[in-house]
Image: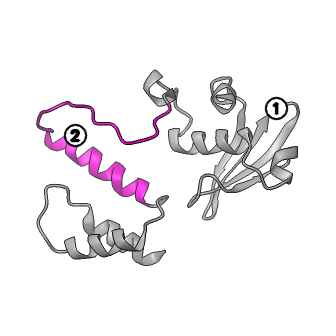
Amino acid sequence: MRALDLYEKGKVKQFKRDYHGFSALVSGTKPYEVSVSNQYYDQGNCQCYLGQNDTLCKHMVVVAIYAVMDGKKLSNEDKKISLSPVCSNRLGNLEKGELSIIKKSIIASLEYTKLEPACIKTFKELTGRETCFGWEEPLWEISEKK
């Protein structure tokens, strides 16, 4: 909740993405230089007391939130804490444009996803098969790079 408060108050400054992750200056009690891994959002560095003791702090969490949200405003749904997957219960068909946007979003987010070996094996089995998604091969290619 403290990280959400920092995010909503615009305390993340000088946000940068690079090959290894994300970095920013976070205004807290004083400005803290913060970095977060792009593979493991719960791993990073911070100049605050907790960060210096290898403990995940609100400053690292707010940088991870900023990376995921790309600095956009959080909705009430974004602020909910969910401990397990939740189904929207919405049924319907996607327009081609909507499906294309979703596919691109999934492929882009895979860059930041750590895959378990069993998942990689499953997606490898889907490579070359016709599915309604079309993101299995890009997922396999990304997992091969990691």
Marks 1 and 2, how far apart at CA: 39 Å
Instruction: Determine the residue positioned at 32% across, 52% down.
Output: 104
**Is residue 88 highlighted in magenta?**
yes
Q: Is residue 64 left or right of residue 113?
A: right
Q: Quadrant of residue 24?
A: top right
Q: Is residue 26 above or below residue 122?
A: above
Check whether the beta carbons of the residues at disc 1 and disc 2 lie within 8 A of each other: no
Asked which secondary structure carries label 1, the reply is loop
Q: Residue 48, image x and y in percent?
A: 85, 44
Image quarter of residue 54: bottom right
| Residue stretch rendered in magenta on the structure | 81-110
Residue 101: quadrant of the picture:
top left
Q: Along the polypeptide, which appears first: circle 1 or circle 2?
A: 1
Identify which amino acid the numbered label 1 is placed on.
Gly
Locate residue 122, reporting x and y percent. 27, 71
- Asked whether 24 falls inside the magenta stretch, the response is no
Identified at 22% across, 75% down, the residue is 125
The residue identified by callout 2 is: 98
State the scheme by which the image is colored. Answer: one colour
Can you give x and y, in whole percent of width and height, for residue 55 in the image? Answer: 77, 51
| Of the pair 30 and 116, the residue shown nearer to us | 116
Disc marking residue 10: none
Q: Say which quadrant the N terminus sits in.
A: top right
Looking at the image, residue 3 sits to the left or right of residue 68; the answer is: right
Identified by mark 2, the residue type is: Glu
Numbered circle sitting on residue 28: 1
Q: Seen in the image, is 6 located left or right of residue 31?
A: left
Does residue 82 sit above or below 56 in this rendering? above
Using a 10 Å C-alpha cutoff, classify the residue at mark 1 as few (fewer than 14 neighbours), some (14 to 19) or many (20 or more): few
Residue drawn at x 28%, y 36% is 87
Q: Which one is in front in this view, the residue at disc 1 or the one at disc 2?
A: 1
Percent across and percent down for residue 34 are 76, 48
